[in-house]
Image (spheres, rainbow, N blue to C red):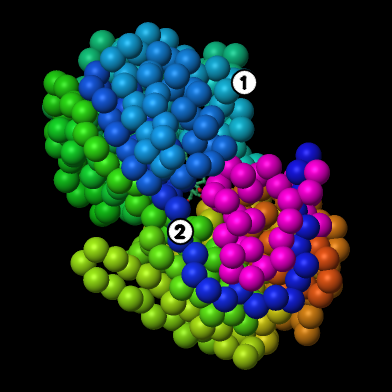
Amino acid sequence: MDKLLIEGGHRLCGEAEMSGAKNAALPILCAALLTREPLTLTNVPQLNDIGTMLKLLAQMGVAVQREGSTVTLDASGLNNPLAPYEMVKTMRASILVLGPLVARCGEARVSLPGGCAIGARPVDQHIKGLTAMGADISVEHGYVVARTTRLKGARLFTDMVTVTGTENLMMAAVLADGETVIENAAREPEVVDLANCLVAMGARISGAGTDVIRIQGVDRLHGATHRIMPDRIETGTYLCAAAVTGGEIRLTGTSAGYLDAVIDKLMDAGCDIRTEKSPSFEAIVLKAPEKLKAVSIRTAPYPAFPTDMQAQFMAVNTVAEGTAVIRETIFENRFMHAVELARLGADIRIDGNTAVVTGVARLDGATVMATDLRASAGLIIAGLVARGETLIERIYHLDRGYERIEQKLTALGATVRRVS
Ligand SMILES: CC(=O)N[C@H]1[C@@H](OP(=O)(O)OP(=O)(O)OC[C@H]2O[C@@H](n3ccc(=O)[nH]c3=O)[C@H](O)[C@@H]2O)O[C@H](CO)[C@@H](O)[C@@H]1O
Ligand SMILES: C=C(OP(=O)(O)O)C(=O)O
């Protein structure tokens, strides 16, 4: 099993290009199931989750062509509306085939998904919404089994803000009969990116990016070409890595507009951040202070601070001046990186969904274990600033969500090596 060996203490300086967003690309790949015509996507990141999703779609009968970061999907031959456990056990986003399959085929058999073990992560809201639209759904032997004639538009209210729930229901609604209104919808930029792609395919959607999304069902969608939005979590991760090492970096291929909450906190920590913008280009430039100040955060749905950046900020706070309080309100088991950070000498106290992090003068390299995707990112950030060598085990999590991370970090001046 691959491990990552980091020699800490090098400032990150220079330029890195950010990739397309995993959490936008995954739902948008599933949108290809909604049409018989080809969907071409550009800026698709090369990640294990993307590979898994493409295999899943291919075994359903979708023709997949991939050339670098461009993927073309042709679902005219869709003939097997099944998502088997073996293919979906590593990936939460596999549940996103459910809505499109029910809408297009009138049936689906989708294994309950796996993904990061950061909480129970039920899919009851997806099921509740599809049921309200007329699907007959049962859970049998670990599979969601759905059947319907044509879905009917409905007024849907999710009990909590759910990102993939909103995406699944929006994809189901685009081919439903009549109007669907999703209330309490997720406002994440990835939901908006999916809506933009669906609109390019002929869907009628308004309100994406607000908490009420309206969808007028159409009889069919057509092919389109769509560019996947930049990965705001990858961007935030590199900003934290530069901040913690006292570095100065310029990130291209990304956009500050999706990162207000994260950039605000880094500025509170003392970083100097500016954006360079022209109609066709945007870059974010960060210069770290001599000494970072502790910053408290509370995770919540967009536009508030993202849970997917919580581990990285915990790592930043371990060496900042002062004490930070970190509240995780989205996932009940997303502090697993704390005990691993403690191995490096971090001072962290956990009480329920709250972590109190008191900055220490320095971290010391040690062997640690990555427990999920963003925990891995948090450990890398800590390893970059720790004295000596840090060995991170189980980095397969990392390969689900960060494209060419060793190359990008190395180009910025880090000493990072993958070892078996
Ligand atoms: C592939 C993808 O886009 N993953 C992102 C997505 O995950 P994902 O879409 O799985 O996360 P949700 O927004 O659905 O989860 C939010 C909360 O709602 C709960 N819930 C959700 C659905 C449901 O039917 N029932 C229920 O109880 C979850 O357990 C969690 O506590 O949004 C999360 C929150 O921003 C991010 O951390 C993930 O990176
Ligand atoms: C939790 C994440 O991914 P997933 O929802 O795919 O498990 C993430 O991207 O941080």
Point out the frontmost of discs 1 and 2. 2
Residue 61 image point, x, y percent: 40, 13
76 to 229, vertically: above or below:
above
Residue 233 image point, x, y percent: 49, 58
What range of the chain is rendered magenta? 391-420
Magenta stretch contains residue 168: no
231 to 381, vertically: above or below:
above
Q: Is residue 190 visible?
A: yes
Asked whether, in this view, residue 198 is left or right of residue 243, the answer is: left
Residue in view at x 38 percent, y 18 percent? 62
In the image, 256 versus 139, the foreground residue is 256
Residue in view at x 34 percent, y 26 percent? 73
Crowd around label 2: few <14 · some 14–19 · many ≥20 (10 Å): many
Crowd around label 1: few <14 · some 14–19 · many ≥20 (10 Å): few
Magenta stretch contains residue 399: yes
Tag 1: residue type? Glu
Residue 346 image point, x, y percent: 78, 72
Residue 110 image point, x, y percent: 49, 20
Mark 2 — residue? 18
199 to 319, vertically: above or below:
above
Q: Quadrant of residue 245?
A: bottom right
In the image, 27 versus 19, the foreground residue is 19
Mark 1 — residue? 86
Q: Quadrant of the C terminus?
A: top right
Secondary element at tag 2: loop
Mark closer to the chain start, 1 or 2: 2
Tag 2: residue type? Met
In the picture as drawn, the residue positioned furthest to the bottom comes out as 290
Residue in view at x 81 percent, y 75 percent? 387
